[in-house]
Amino acid sequence: MENTLRVIIAAPEEKARDTLKKQLLRIERVVLEADYSSYGCFAEELLQRKPDVGILLIDEDPSLPLKMVRQIFAKAPDSVLFVASSSSDGNVILQCMRAGVSEFLTAPVCFEELLQALNRADENRRIRDQDRRHRCSLMAVAGSAGGVGTTSLAVNLGCALASVTSHSVALIDLDLNLGDTDICLDTIAAMTLIDLTESVDRLDEKRLRRSLVRHATGLHVLSRPLSLTDQREIDLDKLHRLINLLEETFSHVIFDLSKGYTAIDQAVLSRSDQILLMTHLDPSGLHNVIRLFAFFDEVIGCADKVRLVLNHVDREETSLSLKKAAEIIGRNIDWEIPYDRQALEDARRGGIPLIEQAPRAVITDAIVGLSNTFTVAPALATIPAWQRSGNPVSQMPY
């Protein structure tokens, strides 16, 4: 779960280590991932696993563990370390604090003191997470049915955002069976979402970027598994940790959801800052919109983050008017995407995004206009000239 605290510990003395383990296991939200008798193994695993908290019990000679602590912070300055010691030597405490240790606990560790320290670490983590989310925009693109254009929007929105030089954008395909973001962009993936969640303990920002395919527009893409036989389950706790790393690495992350609204989709919806719900102007899709809003509100509690996007608004066979659609769903439509069959077919056939295939098309203007609403105060000079023509819904030329 997202609110768990992942902890690893090290103590050369077995009795002290067992006592600390028992105290940690009393705390419901703590997940004790590993315990070590060796300082070296502890340091190696902390750098690899990246737990929320590492707790180190130091023996009578503090020189070796203090040297290791300094090495840890030199390589991973954001690490959270507690040190416990029976020593009352002020110099040892001072060296720990100067090295970057968050908490110095007196050994044997008092349960209440340990609990308070972990509570402080948890609160600091929440503050860091909020700061990270302010720097990164997480977007989920969902659909009221199959074929309403969610992948097309996710791909082209991602490419439009990535074309701004101040942005760093990732697109994650959550349709693990039949996703086709790779087809839309003519890319071949070496790594998939399943691979990255399984190896999240060994990932950092650099490795994460290398694991995603970089399109010519600058968009980083993570595709679905190559084979339908790859049915490995995704651990939701590891998924949340991967999302955390994506937030630290990119300015915008777009998730192209499946139509099954699986546990994976729901986890992403709960984390997203904005949800774009795509639908067509037909009774079936609009009635599903009503059902989905109830689902978002009752099950996930994210209905307030949903923006309704109406696709193919001027398609000839559409029988409903925009006014009638708004009456059916009982809410306004936030954005409209016009229908341009030729531009869409040409882009799809060539695996080329609309900003490259049809940069002056009205449909491209609509998607670029939508992307501009997710742009964090970019300098106008960094935006390509064609992108400056994006208009809000009220000014759309259709």
Image: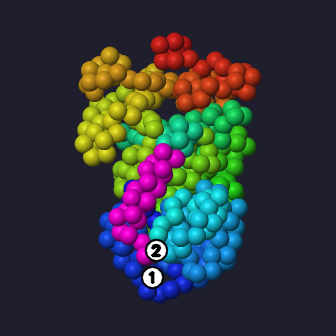
Gap in angstroms between the C-alphas marked 1 and 2: 9 Å
Looking at the image, is 79 positioned above or below residue 315? below
Q: Which residue in the rendered view is the most extreme toward the front? A: 89
What crowding class fits label 1: few (fewer than 14 Cα within 10 Å), some (14-19), or many (20 or more)? some
Q: Secondary structure at mark 1?
A: helix
Disc 2 element: loop
Residue 391 visible within the image: yes
Give the image quarter of residue 72: bottom right
In this picture, residue 16 sits left or right of residue 48: left
The number of callouts visible is 2
In percent of the image, x 54 and y 58: which residue is there? 102
Which stretch did the figure color magenta? Answer: 107-129
Identify the residue at horizontal 58%, vertical 70% (top origin). Answer: 89
Residue type at tag 2:
Ala
The residue depicted at 61 percent of the width and 40 percent of the height is 251
Instruction: Determine if residue 192 is in view.
Output: no
* In the image, residue 298 lies in the stretch drawn in magenta: no
Residue 25: quadrant of the picture: bottom left
Please give the residue where the numbered disc 2 appears in the rendered image. 107
Q: Viewed as shown, does residue 5 lie left or right of 248?
A: left
Q: Looking at the image, is mark 1 or mark 2 earlier in the sequence? A: 1
Residue 90 - label: none
Find residue 327 and report its horizontal and vertical position in percent: 26, 20
Name the residue: 69% across, 49% down: 214
Residue 345 place in picture, x, y as percent: 59, 36
Q: Depth check: 391 or 3 in front?
A: 3
Label for residue 16? 1
The chief SS type of the magenta part is helix
Left or right of 344? Residue 74 is right
Disc 1 to disc 2: CB gap under 8 Å: yes
- Residue 90 coordinates in the image, percent (x, y): 59, 65
